[in-house]
Every structure is written in C-alpha cells, then in structure tokens.
Image (tube, rainbow, N blue to C red):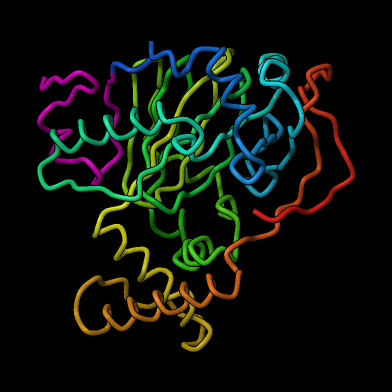
C-alpha cells in the first residue's frame, strides 16, 4: 500500500485510475471543513446559481422524475434540519469559490493524486459538497468532467454503469454535453444491473470511474455528507470536444453515430468546430439553461420540503 497524507493506493489502483471504477481510501473525513458549523456557513454563502436541491421518491427508478427545489433565504441550520428529517439532496457547487480554505484543500488533494498517478495532470478543477437525507435515492445521471465521490459522513452505495449503449447512448451524452438535455435524461431498465459495478462507501472511502459513466446512489438510514471533485485533462478535453461536435453534426448525417476518435484530421476538424461553437454561445449569452423548480425546502415538513407552483429559473 502506497501512502501519503491524504490518500492510499495499491499498485493496481494506480494503473487503473480513470480506466475502470475504483474504490479507494482517504484520510479527510475529520476535516473541520465538513463540520456542521462549516456546512451551515457554506449553505448560507453559496449563491443561487451555485446550488441544486433535489428530491425523488425513494422507490423511483426513472431518473427523469428527479425534481428541482429551492432553499433561498433559509439559514444553514434550517436546511440541515430539513435534510435530517426529510428526503432531500443538497448540492453545493464550486465551493472553492466561496472560501479560500476549500480552494487550498482542493489543490492539496489533486497534488496528492498527481504524485501517485504517473502522467496524470489535471486542470480546471472544482469541488462540490453533498448533504443528503437518510435513505435518499439519487437518480441515475452522467457527469461531463472527470469525477470522483468522497465519503465524509454516513454510508451509501453507488452503482456505476458502462459509458456505452444501452446504458449511455451516444446521442444522450452529446445532448448532455451540449446542454440540450439534463444529466438525468437517461434510459434505465432493471436488466442494466447485471453490468453495474457497486461499492459501499463509508467515511474514509472514495470512488472514481471512467469519464461519463452513468451512476446512481442510495444512502443508508443516516444523514450523508460527501464531496465530489471534478477535473479535466487533455484526454478528457478531447473526448468532450468530439461529443460536442458529434452532437452538432448529428442532424446533418441522418441522426447516426459518428466516430469518437481523438486523433487524426477528422478529430481536429471537430475540435475546431466545438471551440468555435462554444465561443459563439458565450458571446451570444446562450450558456445558461432553464430549470423547473416545484418545491421549497421546509424544515417543518415531514419530507423536508413543501410543493410550490412550478416556475423556471436559468442555471
């Protein structure tokens, strides 16, 4: 076992990092950054466009039933109370922008990973904190950047599915990358479980998987506190560009899947197309997408939230 101040690695885990789903261990669970007081402060400091609060029925398997809510104006203590008694998932994004301690923590963590994994060099890193209710059911979804899940408090199980059809049709990841579809807009069938890799995470565990792997999570009967890290590498950027360009080209090639090679003249043409289109979207202020909100966190409600008339916000 190769050790450092933050993470532990076996030789096979070093070789397979980013290539297959892995369960590893860390020494971060006792950090003061995840105490109740720190979490309450973080909830109150996170702006509206940097958080999600969600719910879904505990027995629901359709990821498209994932609901969006709001907690604006509530204190951190009130939100934590609603989490403890209810059925909600609080996702605080880009926390490294809220307080310098989280930026320093994130940089130390990736420096530690890069010391262990030869050739791994990351950039555009980000960190989210997840605070979720006992028995919370987190809908199947696929993330765009490289992703890891770090358990700080409580217990949960995560299921990871291959990043290919039928679990992740090529058109679905293209739509997610292009922000034409939600990250939960994925097919699911009980037969998919035969292909899933499953891990139980307790405080001190972390899991990581190959780019875009669909995954879902279920908490045990306890409040869970976790954080996720996102990152990019040159290789991940190239795969992103290909998915982006293929999504733009799909209507012009009869809806068929195109090559996802990340080398050669075709790739560089797609890379240029993706870069140009992203630049245009930024100039045209088309980088935000509408989200429907239909509940509000309510610490007095049995489920930790109350329904409201649906309305839309831009994220």
What is the span of residues highlighted in magenta in the rendered image?
Answer: 1-26
The residue located at (47%, 30%) in the rendering is: 99
The residue located at (74%, 39%) in the rendering is: 69
Q: Position of residue 4 (x, y in %)?
A: 16, 20
Seen from the viewer's position, the closer of residues 205 and 126 is 126
Query: Residue 285 in magenta?
Result: no
Quadrant including the N terminus:
top left
Q: Position of residue 190 (x, y in %)?
A: 54, 42
The residue located at (58%, 15%) in the rendering is: 223
| Residue 266 location, quadrant | bottom left
As drawn, the residue found furthest toward the right would be: 309
Query: In the rendered view, would you say 214 is above or below 229?
Result: below
Query: In the rendered view, would you say 46 is above or below 75?
Result: below
Looking at the image, residue 305 sits to the left or right of residue 22; the answer is right
The residue located at (46%, 74%) in the rendering is: 279
Looking at the image, residue 311 sits to the left or right of residue 253; the answer is right
Query: In the rendered view, would you say 200 is above or below 37?
Result: below
């Amino acid at each position: 076992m190769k050790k450092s101040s933050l993470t532990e690695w076996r030789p096979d885990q070093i070789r397979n990092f980013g290539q297959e789903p892995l369960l590893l261990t860390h020494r971060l669970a006792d950090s003061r950054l995840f105490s109740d007081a720190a979490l309450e402060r973080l909830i109150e400091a996170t702006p509206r466009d940097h958080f999600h609060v969600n719910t879904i029925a505990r027995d629901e398997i359709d990821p498209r039933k994932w609901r969006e809510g709001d907690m604006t104006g509530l204190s951190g203590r009130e939100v934590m109370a609603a989490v403890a008694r209810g059925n909600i998932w609080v996702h605080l994004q880009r926390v490294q922008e809220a307080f310098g301690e989280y930026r320093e923590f994130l940089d130390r963590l990736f420096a530690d990973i890069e010391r262990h994994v030869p050739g791994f060099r990351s950039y555009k890193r980000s960190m989210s904190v997840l605070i979720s209710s006992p028995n919370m059911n987190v809908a199947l979804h696929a993330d765009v950047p490289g992703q890891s899940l770090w358990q700080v408090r409580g217990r949960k199980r995560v299921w990871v599915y291959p990043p290919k059809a039928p679990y992740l049709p090529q058109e679905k990841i293209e739509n997610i990358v292009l922000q034409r579809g939600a990250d939960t807009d994925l097919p699911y069938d009980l037969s998919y479980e035969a292909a899933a890799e499953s891990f139980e995470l307790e405080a001190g565990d972390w899991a990581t998987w190959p780019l875009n792997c669909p995954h879902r999570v279920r908490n045990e009967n306890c409040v869970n506190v976790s954080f996720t890290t996102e990152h990019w590498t040159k290789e991940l950027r190239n795969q992103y560009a290909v998915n982006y360009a293929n999504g733009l080209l799909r209507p012009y090639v009869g809806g068929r899947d195109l090559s996802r090679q990340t080398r050669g003249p075709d790739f560089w043409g797609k890379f240029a197309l993706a870069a140009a289109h992203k630049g245009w979207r930024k100039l045209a202020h088309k980088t935000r997408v509408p989200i429907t909100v239909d509940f509000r966190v309510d610490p007095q409600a049995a489920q930790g939230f109350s329904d409201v008339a649906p309305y839309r916000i831009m994220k």
